[in-house]
Image: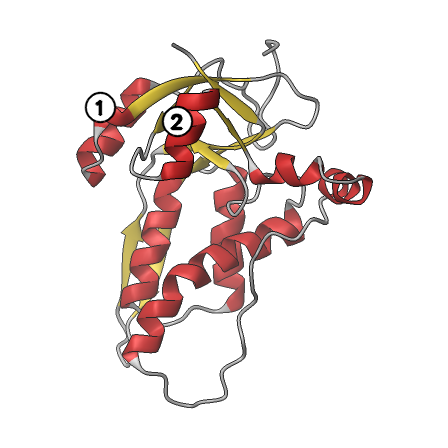
Amino acid sequence: MKKNIKLMNIDEEIPEEFFIFINFSNPVTRNNIELTGRFTSSGITEASISKEKLNEYLTGTMQYAPYVPNPIQNNSISLFSISVTNEYSVEYEAEYIRSAYFPLYPSRFACIYAFGDYETCCKVAKKYDWDINTVKKFRLLENPLNRVVKVNMEHVSLWRRIKNTYTTFERKDTDNFWKSYWRGDKDINVEIPYINLNNKNIVSSGTIYEYLIEGTLELIH
């Protein structure tokens, strides 16, 4: 990879090496590592199918969300319904803002997730109990279609906790939260409104940076 290639959302150079926790129990992942030693993002793969798909990729009009939320007519929603839809709603909200305001950025539905250094992997392994022994080192292969952004993964972790615990937010507050995520902001504070109470609570995300990558990563042996 050539040097001096910048991230799309932050004025920093793209790292020369990336680190990924590999799920060897997934047969597709194991096959990619053992046979090719490469991972290619879904967006790049899709863009290679046809001129139409390439144009969608280049113009930021490619659609990645597998489905859109259905407006629920019920006045009362069960706790089970809330729990099973919250995970996707978090991802859909992130994708909605990406598509509307940052259409050329890698989609969370199509990108490769990676960290920029081994020290961050150690921090993540300790906090989330991920197996540090599964971490492998990669390089990004040169490609004019490459796209990379640096984002705070703790934004997503915080919003998942919020969605599972607290009441809904106004649209503008949700939008501002995800705009902050795509800008690559650090620690973010969120004001949580309590139901039927005047007092409010402030929760913070913390900061652990990861990279969302459209491109092909090659294993470094």
Q: Is residue 40 visible?
A: yes
Mark 1, other Cα within 10 Å: few <14 / some 14–19 / many ≥20: few
The x and y percentages for residue 122 are 23, 25
Lower position in the chain sequence, tag 1 or tag 2: 2
Please name whichever residue, 158 or 186, is drawn nearer the observer in this view of the structure. Answer: 158
The residue depicted at 42 percent of the width and 37 percent of the height is: 28
User: In 3D space, how far apart are the residues under numbered discs 1 and 2 (Cα atoms)?
Assistant: 15 Å
Q: Secondary structure at mark 1?
A: helix
Horizontal arrangement in the rendering, residue 204 relative to residue 57 (left or right)? left
Q: Is residue 186 visible?
A: no
The residue depicted at 38 percent of the width and 60 percent of the height is: 87
Give the label, 1 or 2, closer to the camera. 1
Amino acid of disc 1:
Asn
The residue depicted at 46 percent of the width and 55 percent of the height is: 91
Mark 2, other Cα within 10 Å: few <14 / some 14–19 / many ≥20: many
The x and y percentages for residue 177 are 47, 53
The residue depicted at 39 percent of the width and 27 percent of the height is: 115
Q: Is residue 100 above or below residue 19?
A: below
Amino acid of disc 2:
Phe
Horizontal arrangement in the rendering, residue 164 relative to residue 153 (left or right)? left
> Which mark, residue 144?
none
Quadrant, the C terminus: top left
Q: Which residue is mark 2?
A: 115
Please name whichever residue, 214 or 149, is drawn nearer the observer in this view of the structure. Answer: 214
The x and y percentages for residue 15 are 49, 17
Q: Is residue 61 above or below residue 137?
A: below
Q: Which residue is mark 1?
A: 133
